[in-house]
Amino acid sequence: MFERIENEYLKVEISPLGAELKSIFHKQKYQEYLWQGDSTWWPRNAPVLFPIVGKLNNNSYKVDGKKYSLPQHGFARDMEFSVFEKAADSIVFELRSNEETLAKFPYTFSLKITYRLEENRLFTNYKVKNLSLEEMYFSIGAHPGFICPMYENETLEDYYLEFEKKETLQRHLLDNGLFNGESEIIMTDTSILSLHPKLFEKDAIVFKNMDSKCMILKSKKSDYRLEFSFEGFPYFGIWQKPGAPFICLEPWCGIADNKGFDGSFSEKEGIVKLAGNEVFKRGFSIEV
């Protein structure tokens, strides 16, 4: 059973399984914005990526010389969260480390995820607390999918992303989920990225050096507009299965392994280091 929060503009549903968003419905426009999941294309909606983002080399990593295994994007998306706190327009979910998590991730933690509505904006906030005295290492990110194109008379080619600033950006290329050391420039001194299926034939578009902390998904044919703000996330992914009727906008604190990486987890690119009993906070918002 899903939890629901709402205000005069939006009705949002979230599953306790993975604390995953299931619906972002605009009451005044009578429009669903979140991809509703379809096993033909992609069965998920908006998984939370924790304690890794992307894939590990050989699906394994080392802490203090000991080897652990984790699937792509970690385990949080497939675990039951408890409802920590709830109001009409906000809710807090929590996942705490337990025997199951310690077998794959040797750190004690609390992960709280808050969803909060403010007019036509949905705020998502992550709060990771290290429950031990030892340093903890992790990554965290979001993977929300949005219906795109929205209307029957549109195609993906009618849509574009408008960045907050002019950018010259390289996409870092993946080979079976791992970075292969290659990159290619796909934006040069522009704030516009036009969308088309060929963009995604080489897997996700991954940016590592973006100045913009806000982008707007727009249509040339309709008044569709979705504004995505993500201050504090150093990496960003844009993904769809080529031809699928959705697009994922993904802010990350962390990133997949480079091909052949065999170092310790603490040396992994983009890893977050959190001192004992300290708290890490990040958040992003979606405005429709």
Image (cartoon, grey):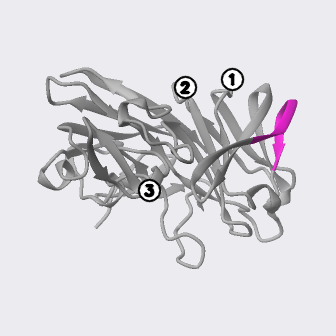
- Between the residue at mark 3 and the residue at mark 1, the CA separation in whole angstroms equals 32 Å
Q: Is residue 18 left or right of residue 103?
A: right
Earlier-in-chain disc, 2 versus 1:
1
Q: Is residue 234 left or right of residue 185?
A: left
Q: Quadrant of residue 14?
A: bottom left
- Between the residue at mark 2 and the residue at mark 1, the CA separation in whole angstroms equals 10 Å
Q: Name the residue rendered at 50%, 54% in the picture.
A: 24
Earlier-in-chain disc, 2 versus 3:
3
Q: Name the residue rendered at 18%, 25% in the picture.
A: 134
Region rendered in magenta: 183-194
Is residue 191 part of the magenta span, yes or no? yes
Does any portion of residue 119 appear in the rendered image? no
Location of residue 59 with respect to 87 vertically, above or below: below
Q: Main secondary structure of the magenta part?
A: strand
Say what amino acid the circle numbered 2 marks.
Answer: Glu
Residue marked by disc 3: 58
For label 1, the SS is loop
Of the 4 image quadrants, the one containing the C terminus is top right
Is residue 230 part of the magenta span, yes or no? no
For label 3, the SS is helix
Does any portion of residue 220 appear in the rendered image? yes
Location of residue 104 with respect to 271 vertically, above or below: below
Say what amino acid the circle numbered 3 marks.
Answer: Asn
Mark nearest the camera among 2 and 1 is 1
Say what amino acid the circle numbered 1 marks.
Answer: Asp
- Crowding around mark 3 (Cα neighbors within 10 Å: few <14, some 14 to 19, many 20+) is some
Dot label at residue 231: 2
